[in-house]
Image: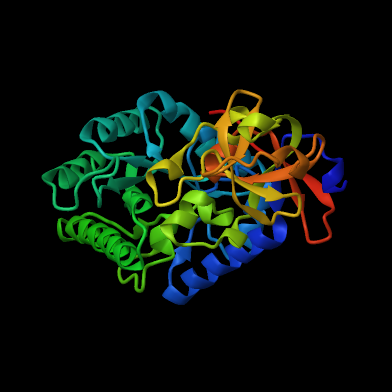
Amino acid sequence: MKISDISTPAALIDVDRMNRNITRMQSRMNGLGVRFRPHVKTSKCVDVTQAQIQAGASGITVSTLKEAEQFFAAGVTDILYAVGMTSNKLAQALALIQKGCDLKILTDSVQSASAIVAFAIANHAYFKVMIEIDTDDHRSGIKPNSPQLLEVAQALAVGGTEIYGVMTHAGSSYDLNTPEALLHMAEQERSGCVRAAQRLRDAGFSCAVVSVGSTPTALSARELAGVTEVRAGVYVFFDLVMLNIGVCNIDDMALSVLTTVIGHQQEKGWVIVDAGWMAMSRDRGTQKQTTDFGYGQVCDVAGVPLPGYVMTGANQEHGIISKQGEPDLSIASRFPVGSSLRILPNHACATAAQFPEYQAFTSEQNTQTWPRFYGW
C-alpha cells in the first residue's frame, strides 16, 4: 500500500527514522557500559520492540500487565512492570510468572511490600521486586536517604520475595530545555539511585540492579557509574515535547498522523482536516514550553514541516489548521479539499494510543500494517 492509498486519519511510522533513533540510543548505552531496557509503552507494538531487541536491548519495561502478557506471548520473557504493585494485580502477575515470564514488579511502600509478601507466602509464590526511588520529586518513589527505604526492604525480607534492585525515573527532566540542566538532572538521577542501592547493601540487603532513565536523561548523561541498566521510551519516535527539550531534531520524529483536508473557513484562515483530538489526543504538552505547537506541527504529505502552520484547534473528529500570527487568507488555495497532510504530535505516546495500528513505511513509501496493543 502507498501512503496516498491510506484511509485517514492514520498513524504513520517512518521506519528509517525509527531505526536511526534506536541505533542512536543503543549505541549510547553501549558506550556508557550499561544494559538498555526500553520502555515499550510508547509503541505497544511487537514490530517496534523487535527492532529494539535486535539492536541490542536487554529486556523491556511495560506500564500495564496486559502489555506484559502480550509481549510475553510474542516471545519476550525479561519484563519489568514499572508501575507500583497493588494486591488486586498480584494474581495476574503470578499467572505470568508461572508460565515462564521473568517478571519484575515494583513497590514504594511498606503497605504494598507487605501485601506482596502475604500473597507470595499464601500462594507458595516468589516475586522479584524492585523498590522505586524518588530522585526528583516528580511522582512516585522513596527518597534515597529516607528511613522508609530500609523499612520497605525489611518488609520484603519476611519471605516470598527477592529484592531485585532499585529503579528511578527522572520525569521532571521533561521540564528542562538546556544541555546543562539536563546533564545536572541525569547526574541527580544516577547519584540518587546509586546511593539508595548502597544503603540497602550496607544494611545487608541484596540489590543487584540499579535502573535509571528517561529519554532526556538517557541522552544527556556523561557517565553512569554504579548504574546497571537504563530505561527510556519515547526516543523511539520522539515528539515535539522532546524537540523543545532539545534532545532531538524535527527530522528525527518518526511518528506522524496522516490527515485529509475536508473543508475551510477562508475568512478565518482555517483549514479543516479529519484528524481531531481523537487522532492527535488532547495532549498540549508544548503549551508550557518555549514553542507552542498547538495540537501538532503541520507537514506536507512527504513529512516536510511547513513553518508557522500548526493544528490550532481540535474537536473530536475535526482539526483546525491555521498559520500562527497573521491569518493566511489564501490558505484554501494552498491546501485544497482532498489534499493530504501529516501532523507531528506533541506527545508520541498519547497520539499513538489513539490508534489500533500503525502504517509503517520506508523511504520507498510502501507501507505495512503493524498492530498495536490496547487496554489494561
Regarding residue 164, the answer to whether it shows in the image is: no
Q: Position of residue 163 (x, y in %)?
A: 31, 49
Q: Position of residue 331 (x, y in %)?
A: 70, 40
Along the line of sight, which residue is nearer the eye, 163 or 132? 132
Along the line of sight, which residue is nearer the eye, 298 or 238? 298
User: Vertical placement of 84 versus 133: above or below?
Assistant: above
Q: Residue at x 39, y 48 (%)?
A: 289
Q: Position of residue 167 (x, y in %)?
A: 34, 52
Q: Residue at x 36, y 73 (%)?
A: 222
User: Vertical placement of 14 versus 9: above or below?
Assistant: below
| Quadrant housing residue 11 | top right
**Which residue is situated farthest in the left direction here?**
147
Regarding residue 269, the answer to whether it shows in the image is: yes
Q: How many marks?
A: 0
Q: Residue at x 21, y 38 (%)?
A: 155
| Quadrant housing residue 229 | bottom left
Along the line of sight, which residue is nearer the eye, 174 or 4? 4
Give the colour scheme of this rendering: rainbow
Q: Residue at x 77, y 41 (%)?
A: 333
Q: Position of residue 164 (x, y in %)?
A: 35, 52
